[in-house]
Image: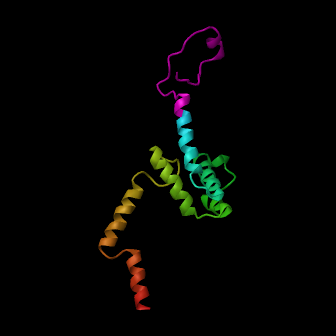
């Protein structure tokens, strides 16, 4: 049995009137499943600072006005992680759930950056090649 949260006014419920289900209604089972995926994401690292960092970063991206932090950099500093590590983990969750976060780069930007970096590697113009050449000359 699926359970949905009703938006029907209480008077209609008390009279026994039925409301057609909304097309966009989400069942309790669907919500619980999403929560389980999120909790697995948050808790899949045994280090407590990672768990705290992921939870706080996710809260910041989903509801920045509810967060006590002004940036992911502040969260990273408080939990002893890098901003890049937190950002990467939250992006992996968003990709796994096939959702777009309300902040960050536009859809397709990461893929176009990746393609450009691969192109630069093939042309031996990537930053890593430049550093290697400079180090060899020193």
Q: Does the magenta portion include 20?
A: yes
Q: Nearer the viewer, residue 22 or 80?
A: 80
Total numbered labels? 0
Name the quadrant containing residue 4.
top right
Taking the view exactly as shown, the residue that stands out farthest to the top is 15
Taking the view exactly as shown, the residue that stands out farthest to the left is 123
* Residue drawn at point x = 38 percent, y = 57 percent: 111
Residue 94: x percent and y percent? 49, 48
The image shows residue 110, relative to residue 97, as above or below, that is: below
Taking the view exactly as shown, the residue that stands out farthest to the bottom is 138
Q: Does the magenta portion include 62?
A: no
In what quadrant of the picture does the C terminus appear? bottom left
Whether residue 94 is visible, yes or no, is yes
* Residue drawn at point x = 67 percent, y = 50 percent: 67
Name the quadrant containing residue 85.
bottom right
Taking the view exactly as shown, the residue that stands out farthest to the right is 68
Q: Is residue 117 left or right of residue 7?
A: left
Residue 129: x percent and y percent? 38, 78
* Residue drawn at point x = 65 percent, y = 56 percent: 48
* Residue drawn at point x = 50 percent, y = 16 percent: 20
Residue 104: x percent and y percent? 50, 54
Residue 51: x percent and y percent? 62, 53
Magenta stretch, main secondary structure, is: loop
Q: Is residue 24 left or right of residue 45?
A: left
Q: Nearer the viewer, residue 43 or 106?
A: 43
Whether residue 99 is visible, yes or no, is no
Q: Which residues are magenta?
A: 1-30
The image shows residue 73, relative to residue 23, as above or below, that is: below
């Amino acid at each position: 049995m699926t359970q949905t949260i009703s938006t029907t006014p209480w008077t209609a419920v008390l009279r026994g009137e039925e409301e057609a289900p909304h097309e966009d209604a989400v069942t309790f089972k669907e919500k619980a499943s999403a929560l389980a995926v999120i909790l697995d994401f948050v808790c899949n690292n045994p280090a407590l600072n990672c768990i705290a960092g992921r939870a706080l970063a996710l809260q910041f991206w989903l509801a920045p006005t509810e967060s006590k932090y002004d940036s992911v950099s502040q969260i990273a500093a408080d939990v002893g992680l890098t901003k890049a590590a937190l950002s990467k983990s939250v992006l992996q969750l968003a990709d796994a759930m096939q959702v777009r976060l309300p902040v960050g780069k536009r859809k397709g930007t990461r893929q176009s950056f990746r393609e450009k970096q691969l192109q630069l590697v093939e042309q031996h113009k990537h930053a890593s090649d430049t550093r290697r050449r400079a180090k060899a000359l020193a």
